[in-house]
Amino acid sequence: MNTTELTNRHWLLILTLSLLTFVLGTSEFVIVGILTDISSSLGITNSKAGTLVSAFAITFAIATPIVMSTTSHFSKRKWMLFLIGAFIILNALCIISSNYLLLLGLRMLTAIVTGVLISLAMMVASETMPAAKRSLAISFVFGGFTLANVVGVPLGTLVAGWFNWNATFMLTTLLGGIAFLAAFFVLPDLQKQARSSMRDQFSLLTHPRILMAFFIPSLGFGATYAVFTYLVPILKQMEAPGGSISLILFGYGFISIFSNILAGKIASRNAIGRLRFVFLIQALVLISLYWTTNQFTLGLINIGLMSLMAILLTTSTQLYLIDLAGIYQPKATGLAASLMPVASNVGIAFGSALGGIVYHQGELMNVTWVGGIVAIAASLLTFLSYRLDQKQKETVIREKLRIS
């Protein structure tokens, strides 16, 4: 059998992991679509309901690496099945929740489960696929999130419109049950990682190369979200018809599917080398919005390109972090697998806040310049990281020649 090709068993596992990330993504993102329903039902303000989103993101970012490091020696199959079961229970409890604090607590617990499951899914995809196909597998697993935004979130919002917001959690509970059955029959037994101390695990985060690799996706996502957070006001300034904004946002999400496919191709060979120029192109696309939005059709094309560039970094940086951990702290690959999802949340929070500061202190379209500058910073950091990789390879080659 050709070990460089994907078998039917490989594809079944990829689809199962993609289904899992689709379910997790739907549960995480759908809250935005039902926020006003929750606020009116629980008798709270929209801003207070918004803490359900921010609390989820903060909990996700803080708890995920901690839990991944403390459970790195667990059996991945049993641990994932347990967590999917916990996800189902937590979403089922949200169905009957009629209290803000209870709902907030349930969402924070769900954030922990979500972050760990995402990290484990990435690890399983990385460890079980032929080396030449790892990038393809990871891009499919990330594709579950893209599909969640395009299909899962609108479906969940529609269900809330037909019934109520509690019914949306019936949907996510049902989807969780389907994901559990698929995982039960498909997830393989994987070799456990050797037990290591918290100190050994978190020593990974003290290495400059790991920190550099972490901030590459943080800046990449920050560049996009400095603009995307204010896309609706931008569309209104472009005088987009009110009824067309939802359709444009759907189109944005649909185009991001192709961004995810391209992400796998970029990661297939010389990923960090290619990513240096991807960020420069992203900067050009974001900055050009400053002028193209003066013309509606040209602006829409530019926004489509922005979506196409948005997640090209995901697969490359996910694999890069895992591979660097394999070099500098092999016992902490589980922690490394959690860093890309955490970096994306950090980037989203950073980009949104930075864009907000610029927006409120000047004209709206200045956010495009901010996004472009952050993308250039991501490119510079990637150039530096790539150069250090090349120097390391040259050192290894010279050492081998010296020994021989």
Image (tube, rainbow, N blue to C red):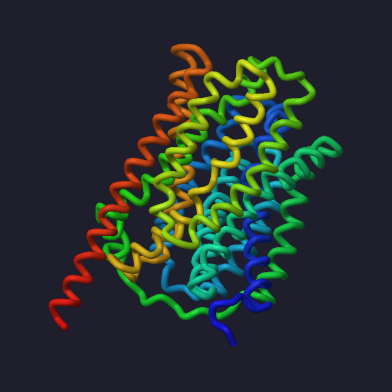
The residue lying at 31 percent from left, 49 percent from top is 212
* Residue 401, position as x, y percentages in the image: 17, 77
Can you name the residue that lies furthest to the bottom here? 1
For residue 359, above or below residue 143: above
* Residue 323, position as x, y percentages in the image: 38, 65
In the picture provided, is 220 more to the left or to the right than 242? left
Quadrant of the image containing the N terminus: bottom right
Query: Residue 258 versus residue 191: which sits nearer the camera?
Result: 258
* Residue 252, position as x, y percentages in the image: 67, 37
Q: Is residue 148 visible?
A: yes
The residue lying at 56 percent from left, 54 percent from top is 114
**How many numbered marks appear?**
0
For residue 116, above or below residue 364: below
Q: Is residue 96 visible?
A: no
The residue lying at 48 percent from left, 51 percent from top is 341
* Residue 393, position as x, y percentages in the image: 26, 65
Quadrant of the image containing the C terminus: bottom left
Can you name the residue that lies furthest to the left here? 402
Query: Residue 35 versus residue 153: which sits nearer the camera?
Result: 153
